[in-house]
Image: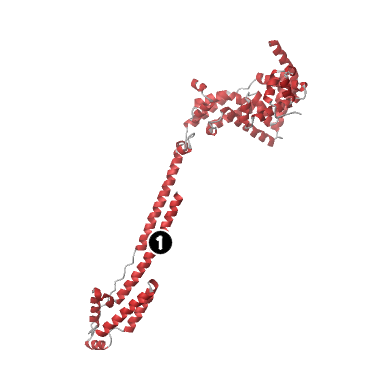
Amino acid sequence: MKNKHTHSPLDFEQLLLSKSYDSLTSEELSLVNQEVGSAKEYEELRMTLISVKKIAQEENRIVADLAIKQALLNQMETKATTLSLWDKIGGFLFPINTKMYKKPGFQFAVMGVLLLLVVNIGLNEFGSRNNELAVNSNKKVKSIEIPEQKAIPEKEKVELIAEPLVQPQETVVEKEVFVEKLEEDVQEEVLILADEVMVDELKDKISVQNVTSVSEAQSRMQTDFYDDSKRSSASDMIVTNDMVLKSKKQKKSIQMTSQSLADQEDVIDLLFVAL
Amino acid sequence: MGKYSSYTDNDLMQGILDKDTHAFSELYDRYNGLLVNYFYKMLWQDKEKAQDFMQDLFAKIIEKPHLFDLKRNFKTWVFSVANNMCKNEYRKQSIRHNTSYDIEEGIQIKDTAMDAMDSLQDSQFSEKLKLELDQLDEKQKSAFVMRYFQELSIKEIAETLNISEGTVKSRLFYTLKKLTVSLKDFAPQLAKMILILLSIAQ
């Protein structure tokens, strides 16, 4: 049985070129017999190989036309002299036979990406601050304008004095409206209590004080407003307005804090992405 | 120009990458003969075609020298490119195998072979060998031509064809067997003459 795995055709080729079947040693014969069935077949292979080698050596080799070389040289010179702008830029940015990280094009690209990241994060920071500023912008409180009162004739004055100047029921209604507004923003109980106290005080003032005219009463209210000790009782409307404003401020400050926290989360997320 | 003759093939390729015309000229001088004869053997002994293919190959080297990896052996690389060009040509020819071109080529070669029957024995053998080579499978033919006509080593053929050395040896042996069967009417007589001449010389 022929063992083709141990056979080496190169050695076989050398044997064919150098030795006839008769001059093979026993070791060489065993090698040859793995592939060749008989001495005749070996000799035929030998003759063919020798003939092929002889033909190959003696064969007239064709020679390329000189015009081909000239045409190729012209092509080479044209290519060398006419480098396009893109070739020059490309050659500068991505030189051949240079490691990737050493190529200027790659370095520029990395710098660009980093710059983009930095600018993006910076803008985001700036944007979040702007948001905070926008939240903080308070609306101007409309100043309470007290319309000038016309002079009241003496007869009407007497009637007015006879009747109570300010109707307590109406004031209570106004306070209740304010209380409803306050209920939306601040704690209910505290405001209701404050209002009740203020209403009582106002009632007391109106009943006790002997006011001669509306204008006097108003002027007194104004002076009381500017007097710290009496402000709370005299200018109940302003006080309640202030309280509404204060409660709104508290609400807005809570909103602002939550918003700034949300913005901080965005920044943290961006920093993670950048890393 | 003298200094270029001492350069290695890869040094010359580096020169071509740097647009050095002299480097290209030196490389062309080294390989044009080998390549044009390889194409000639592989492409049905058509001289015009062989020259066109050789020119195309060098034009590719000029236009796209960066395709060559400087760590590789240039000789095996250039022969692998040449071999691929031949494969493409075989493919083209097999697609239009019924065209007049093939018929004309075949008739021409056969006529030449028929005429050669009247000439000297070695020329008969040579013509028959050409015919038989053309009949070979592309894989067997390329290995055989590289080994016996271009005188590439087994290792170089293996690198060029991207196969193992054992496969190259095996292909060469079975191609020789095949040719022996088809050339048995011619080879022994020529070989006997060669052996007689060798014995006289000794």
Task: Depth check: give the residue in front, A217 or B117.
Answer: A217
Q: Position of residue A268 (x, y in %)?
A: 43, 54
| Image height of A237 relative to A116, above or below | below
Q: Is residue A76 left or right of residue A33?
A: left
Q: Is residue B133 left or right of residue A182?
A: right
Which colour style is shown?
A: secondary structure
Q: Chain of mark 1?
A: A
Could you tell me if residue A57 is visible in this image?
Answer: yes
State the count of labels: 1
Q: Position of residue A61 (x, y in %)?
A: 63, 21
Q: Is residue A59 left or right of residue A110?
A: right
> What is the three-letter code of the residue carrying label 1?
Gln
Residue annotated with mark 1? A259
Task: Depth check: give the residue in front, A274 or B147.
Answer: A274
Residue at screen point 45% across, 54% down: A269
| Image height of A271 relative to A1, above or below | below
Q: Quadrant of residue A186?
A: bottom left
- In the rendered view of the protein, which quadrant contains the N terminus of chain A? top right
Residue at screen point 49% across, 21% down: B3
